[in-house]
Image (tube, rainbow, N blue to C red):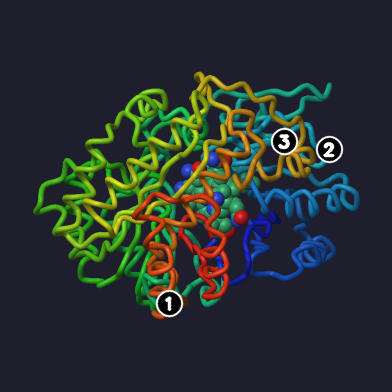
């Protein structure tokens, strides 16, 4: 028996289908006895794991598989794995997921981790089971890191990426879908799906590139069949796609749009500006008709020099052109931008603010997502050439010094002095009041009107400093920023 543990990563109301463990379950289904324990749905996952351990029988637990993303999930994973190691020292523990893949060395330094699966996990997990049962050599499993018998860390060769088509469907029946279908601005019954894995671009600030440096897409027929299943079985009427790059080839996008249009879903996805800008009017109309209402774009910057440094392969003019053009098709773009380029944070913030104003002028519906640059280790030189000495253990990652870094909220960054950080926050407050997000369903109409009128003069004059009254007003009307991508 294998336990696939998805530690708590968010509040129960924000939980979504834990795709990482569902994808792993897909390859175990019908060939191994396994159990999914989801900390987002189970209030006491430790007791559940303990009960599975104590159950006995002829198929005892041989492996605890833990899925770990940076942030709250890491905290929950550490707490459970520490207890597990103490109580069941003989049962191996394997970590996978973005935290484990990005910080494999630090992960292996933990006493409570024996193996790290880096990147796509399905085949690695199956091969790891064979190795644990003695029929395979650990060092021949691709995408694995482990401690050898001297305690030395061994990293095996990378595993080539496979398409989702090469694996069976996620075993949705293993979970209670009612717990995971959410009421969002997209629809009263919103599900999640990932129709491709990885990303073929080389942006040197992104945490995806070091883990998956190419992309494999599911066929439009399979995506449509899975969505149809989610609709007929669980009454889903909206979907958030988790793909890092939902659109790559225009022909693929057109076929997919044609296949899912009859389902009448409303959906959100992430895409690149240049790719969507290159699509014909007819394709954009088809995508909208298929239910696409909002697209999240990693715009990153309004400065072409910064974009070049990031290896983004995009220009600010393309971003403006898309903002203008996509309006016609009634698709709301969400523009994610990185404020505070390490080379000259102050100038970068000023340039980005000026750029946001240009964007809002051509399309006021564009929603701006404000981010700061928080480096992840890259295989080839990081953006801004910043050197960061990363923590050496998972426990160090969750200390007060490093945790804010991991969740990207108010991290200590040497190139981002306090007054620049304040400037970013102040601008964000004014902008979010002037254009409250359409994703906040609970914001009453009067609250929206109040924020807009209070912030109008500030935005018009560019007077962003110390918007204390707007912060009070935001609290009063309970403005939240419930962005789908960062709940
Ligand atoms: C869903 C999601 C969330 C959800 C999680 C909801 C849930 N279900 O619990 C929420 C919204 C909570 C979330 C939060 C955050 N997220 Co997030 N999230 C994602 C997202 C969009 C999808 C993850 C997913 O399900 N993928 C699909 C599955 C199938 O892929 P997978 O997880 O990689 O799993 C495979 C392998 O990793 C491996 N594997 C995984 N686990 C295991 C376990 C074992 C035992 C084995 C063997 C293998 C294995 O096998 C799986 C199948 O191949 C990814 C981007 C992406 N598209 O992957 C970002 C992503 C993982 N998030 C990221 C980050 C940073 C965060 C945050 C920390 C910060 C933020 N604001 O974005 C916050 C946490 C802060 C907080 N909560 O306060 C980054 C991580 C990389 C980085 N830059 O550090 C990503 C990559 C986004 C990005 N582009 O930067 N996130």
Which numbered tag is attached to residue 2? none
* Residue 45 spot, x, y in % from top left: 74, 64
Q: Is residue 360 left or right of residue 369?
A: left
The residue that mark 1 highlights is 234
Residue 366 vs residue 230, the one in the foreground:
366
Residue pictured at 64% horizontal, 41% vertical: 411
* Residue 30 spot, x, y in % from top left: 55, 59
Residue 25 vs residue 206, the one in the foreground:
206
Q: Is residue 226 left or right of residue 29?
A: left
Classify the position of the N terminus by image quarter: bottom right
Instruction: Tell me how far mark 1 sits from mark 3, CA to CA.
Output: 37 Å
Q: Is residue 483 left or right of residue 331?
A: right
Instruction: Tell me how far mark 3 sits from mark 2, CA to CA.
Output: 9 Å
Residue pictured at 52% horizontal, 51% vertical: 426
Which numbered tag is attached to residue 107? 3
**For the residue carrying disc 2, how many other residues have a C-alpha within 10 Å: few (<14), some (14-19), or many (20+)?**
few
Which numbered tag is attached to residue 111? 2
Residue pictured at 51% horizontal, 73% vertical: 177
Vertical position of residue 292 compared to residue 112: above or below: below
Query: In which image quadrant can residue 256 be found?
Result: bottom left
Earlier residue among tags 1 and 3: 3
Q: Secondary structure at mark 3?
A: helix
Query: In which image quadrant can residue 458 be found?
Result: bottom left
């Amino acid at each position: 028996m294998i336990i696939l543990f998805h530690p708590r990563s968010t509040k129960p109301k924000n939980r979504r289908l834990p795709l990482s463990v569902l994808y792993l379950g897909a390859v175990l289904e019908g060939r191994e006895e396994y159990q999914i324990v989801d900390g987002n749905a189970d209030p006491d996952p430790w007791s559940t794991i303990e009960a599975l351990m104590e159950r006995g029988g002829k198929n005892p637990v041989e492996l605890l598989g833990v899925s770990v993303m940076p942030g709250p999930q890491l905290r929950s994973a550490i707490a459970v794995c520490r207890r597990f190691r103490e109580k069941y020292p003989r049962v191996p523990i394997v970590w996978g997921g973005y935290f484990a893949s990005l910080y494999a060395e630090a992960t292996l330094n933990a006493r409570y981790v024996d193996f790290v699966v880096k990147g796509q996990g399905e085949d690695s997990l199956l091969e790891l089971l064979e190795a644990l049962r003695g029929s395979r050599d650990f060092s021949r499993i691709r995408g694995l890191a482990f401690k050898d018998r001297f305690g030395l860390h061994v990293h095996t060769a990378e595993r080539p990426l496979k398409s989702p088509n090469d694996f069976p469907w996620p075993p949705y029946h293993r979970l209670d879908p009612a717990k995971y279908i959410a009421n969002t601005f997209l629809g009263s019954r919103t599900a999640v799906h990932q129709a491709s894995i990885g990303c073929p671009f080389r942006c040197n600030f992104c945490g995806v590139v070091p883990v998956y440096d190419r992309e494999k897409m599911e066929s439009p027929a399979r995506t449509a069949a899975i969505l149809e299943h989610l609709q007929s079985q669980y009454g889903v009427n909206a979907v958030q796609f988790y793909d890092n790059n939902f659109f790559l080839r225009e022909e693929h996008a057109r076929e997919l749009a044609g296949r899912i249009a009859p389902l009448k879903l409303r959906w959100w996805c992430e895409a690149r500006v240049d790719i969507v800008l290159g699509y014909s009017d007819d394709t954009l109309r088809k995508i909208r008709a298929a239910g696409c209402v909002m697209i999240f774009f990693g715009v990153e910057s309004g400065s072409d020099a910064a974009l070049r440094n990031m290896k983004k392969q995009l220009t600010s003019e393309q971003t403006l052109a898309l903002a203008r053009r996509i309006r016609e098709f009634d698709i709301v773009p969400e523009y994610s931008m990185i404020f505070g380029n390490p080379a000259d944070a102050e100038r970068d913030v000023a340039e980005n603010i000026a750029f946001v104003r240009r964007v809002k002028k051509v399309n006021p519906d564009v929603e701006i997502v404000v981010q700061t640059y928080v480096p992840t280790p890259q295989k080839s030189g990081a953006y801004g050439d910043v050197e960061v000495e990363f923590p050496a253990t998972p426990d160090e990652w969750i200390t007060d010094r490093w945790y804010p870094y991991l969740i990207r909220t108010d991290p200590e960054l040497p190139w981002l002095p306090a007054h620049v950080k304040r400037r970013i926050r102040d601008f964000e407050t004014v902008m979010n009041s002037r254009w409250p997000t359409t994703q906040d369903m609970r914001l009453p109409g009067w609250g929206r009107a109040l924020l807009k009128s209070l912030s109008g003069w500030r935005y018009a004059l560019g007077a962003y400093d110390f918007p204390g009254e707007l912060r009070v007003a935001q609290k009063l009307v309970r403005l939240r920023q419930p962005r789908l991508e960062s709940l």
